[in-house]
Structure formats: C-alpha cells, structure tokens
Image (spheres, coloured by chain):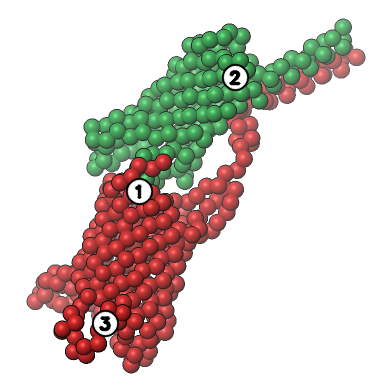
Amino acid sequence: MRYALLFFLFAASMSSYAQKYTAEKTFISFYSDAPLEDITAENVKTSTIFNAATGDIAFSVPMKEFKFAKSLMQEHFNEKYVESEKFPKATFQGKIVDFKPGTTGVQQVKAQGKLTIHGVTKDIDVPGTIEVKGKKLEMKSKFTVKVADYDISIPQLVFNNIAEQVDVTIDFIYKPM
Amino acid sequence: MKFSTILFCFLCLSITVAAQDDLLKELEKSQAPEVEYIEQTFKGTRLVNGQSVETKGQGELEFIFAHRFGPMNGGLYELFGLDQAYVRLGLEYGVTDRLGFGFGRNSVDKTMDAYGRLKVLRQSKGAKVMPVTITAFGQAAIKMSPRKEDDPTGTLTTVNRMSYTAQLLIARKFNSKLSLQLMPTMIHRNRVDQTIEDNDQFAIGVGGRLKVSRSVALTTEYYYRLNTFETNPNKDVLGFGIDIETGGHVFQLVLTNTRGLTERAWLTETTGDFFDGDIHLGFNITRTFQLAERK
C-alpha cells in the first residue's frame, strides 16, 4: 500500500512534467493599417512554455527580431517606439482556460494574464484555439493591442503612417518538453 | 514510516508547485544567451562634415543634399554668408546591411567623389561582447576645376586631379543618448603645393552625439591634422550640428569652419578659423527610399 502510494506520487510528478510543452516553432506578426501606409512585421524567435496540466503559459518575444520590409521602419520601431534597448522583450504570463488536454481537434480557448510591452504590464483576456496534433499542440490567437496602452506615443508628423491599434497574430507549435 | 510517506508527498508537491510558480522565470533560464547587436549609433551616415559608422540598410537608397553658406563674419555686405552657397548632391545605396556605395558632386572645385563603406565589426552584448562598431571607408575624388585651358601651368592631368581617402570609423554607443566616434584618416592627393604640405595627410578625428529627445540629437566633430608643415596656412576642421529626424528624412543643421563637402576639401583645405568668426551655416538633408524589399 505504502509503495503503491509512493509509486503513484512519483508517476504523478513525472506525468506533470510530461505535460509541459515548449516551442517547436513560433510565429508572431503584427499589422498596422493606417491611412498612408500598411505596416507588417514578423517574428519567429519567440520562446514559450505551456503547462497543459495547469494551463499555465508564458512567452517571451525578443523585440529586435521583428522583421519589417523596410529597414527604416525596423530602425524606427526599435529606436523610437518600443525602445528595444531599454525594453528588449515583450512577455506574457498567464493561463489558458477551457483547455481539455484529452480531446482532439480544434478547441476554443481563452488566454488570461499579463502582457508586458515597452515595460508596461496590462491584463488581457483574448480568445484563441488549440489543436492537439498527436504529441504536439498548435495554439493560435488573434487580438488587437492599443499602442497607447503601452505608453508608445506616435508623433503627430507620422500619425497618418501608424495606426492607433495593431492586430497581433500568434501561431505557436508546441512539442513535449 | 507513515511520516516519511507524507514527507515525500510534500516534497513531490513542492517540486511541482515550484515549477509552476513562475513559468516566465523558467523560460528565461532555459534560453541560451543571444548576441544583441547595438544599432543606430548615429542617426545619419554623416556626423557633421565627415562620415559616421552608419551604413544604409539593405536595398535603401539615400539622397543626400548637403549645403554650406559662406562665413558669417562676411557681415551685412555678404548677408552673413548667405550670399554664397556650396552644394553637394549625392546618392548612397545599401547593397547589404553592412556594405554600401555612394557618389556625389560638390560645387567646391567641381569635385566628384565615389566611395564604399563596409561595417567590419558591430558593437554587441550578450553572448558575444564587442565594445565598438568599426566601419572602413574608402573614397576616390576628382577635382574638375580649373579646366585644362584655364590652368596656368598647363600640367593638370586627370591623375593630378585625383585624391584618395581611407578612413577607419570606430564608434561606441555608450547608451541610448551618448555615442562617441574616433576617426583615424589618411588622404593622399596626387598633386599638392609641396612647400606647404605633403601628398599624404594624416589626421585623427573625434566626434560624438548626444540625443536630447526621441528625434533630436546634438553632434560635434573635430579633426586634428597630424603631419602639418609650419608653413601650412590651413586650419583643422571643427563642426557642431543638430540632427532632426522625421520619418524618412534626417535634417542636420550644422555650424562649421569649412565650406568643403568632400574629404579633401574640408580636411585639408579649410581656411576658416572658427573662433575668428569664420563660421559657415549649413544643412545636410537626407531622404531615404526603400528600393528593394528586405528578405
């Protein structure tokens, strides 16, 4: 009985490790739709951990890895808007609610937690989907971020070039840790 | 016996709790340190008169319109220098983020110049620490004035009109506000007045910028000429500037003691004495166009 209990505990602790996922492939893009200029940038260097047992999730986005079509845009993004040298990473820490690890197919889920960009932390609550693909998981989400919420100010002169809110698209593929 | 089981149970629990406690910290620990390159040491490819370590991004074409008025101590008769104007029109293209080529024409002595620049080292921190950014700059220039028929000696061949500049630009961005640059320079001129100067002119430049707001920076630059003859009447070049950046433009408003806009002219043929009022107001205005999309 005692050994059975021990074994059970051991197995339980093992399995909780096995339910942790890390990124195999990540993709984050944002899109700003402004009167004069549409701006998109893509980032494939995000790192993330997801604990399927508890729903805990965290990710960290290196800001300098956002790639723009125009060099000057990338420069201004880093130097003037998100101040990448001062705030090198955007992070999210929170929970995925409504996720059922056992079920296959696409499930609707919600992510709740703290998003930190430009040194400013805000609580967010955004919808998304998770698809269990064998041992792997694919997590997708689309949401909007208001630039002003994160103390990122846009000078009047380029106001027509940059939108007040940007659409963020997330596509993470996880593998067991 | 029972106690040990419970203990073990707690131990297991505590481990899993700790693991869930701060996933973000765990994430940061699991990340291998990355190389972080320091960018935008300066706003423009020119510091004041001379070059900065900056190169254009891949596929970027920069149009540079630079302009110097006459000396301010010309007084009201010369409208404080505004009656005279010296212009250089230039283009620079970024082949890669680190390699660029450019050419231009300066109205001073009707000089045409062509140059290349290569960012040899990039300042970085993190996994690879590199304290400075180093850019190598090389230029060839030709004076088209005076015309052959106007030359009193009649010996001004094409070769005699040429000059060459080699420069190492070494800069460090200390923080987002302060960047400093050191510029060992050599200029070779095929023909000079050898009673006052040598064909090779060596110089060492120092410069820097101080950002005062997100879009405005103050710059300064001074070149000390090393092998000057006592008979040489020319002066070392000194300049101050204000950089204002708006979108694709950089406006540089400068005050300097030279009218020259190519290396030979401002480094070796500056006659003005800054502290005697030979101060020229000038502008460097750049516009950047993205010709090719980045990959």
Along the viewing direction, whichever of A24 and B146 lies nearer the viewer? B146
Q: Which residue is mark 1?
A: B59
Label 2 marks a residue whose chain is A
Residue in the foreground of this view, choosing between B87 and B102: B102
Disc ID at residue A136: 2
Residue type highlighted by circle 2: Lys
Residue name at image x 33 percent, y 76 percent: B163
Q: Residue at x 73, y 24 (%)?
A: B15
Crowd class of label 3 (few under 14; some 14 to 19; many from 20; radius 10 Å)? few
Question: Who comes first in sequence, dot 3 or dot 1?
Answer: 1
Q: Residues within 10 Å of mark 2 (few under 14, many from 20)?
A: some
* Horizontal arrangement in the rendering, residue A133 relative to residue A28 (left or right): right
Quickly name the residue at label 3. Answer: B157
Which chain is drawn using red? B
Q: Position of residue B193 (x, y in %)?
A: 30, 89
Distance from disc 2 to disc 3, alpha carbons, whole Å, reads 74 Å
Say yes or no: labels 1 and 2 on the same chain.
no
Q: Quadrant of residue B230?
A: bottom left
Residue kind at label 1, given as amino acid type: Gly
| B45 to the left or right of B35 | left
Q: Is residue B39 left or right of residue B29?
A: left
For the residue pair B196 and B98, the one nearer the viewer reads as B98
The crowd level at tag 1 (other Cα within 10 Å; few <14, some 14-19, many 20+) is many
Residue A7: horizontal and vertical position, in percent?
A: 82, 13
Query: From the viewer's perspective, is the residue at label 3 or at label 1 nearer?
Result: 3
Horizontal side of residue B85 vs B196, given as left or right: left
Chain coloured green: which letter?
Answer: A
Which disc, if any, is residue B207? Answer: none
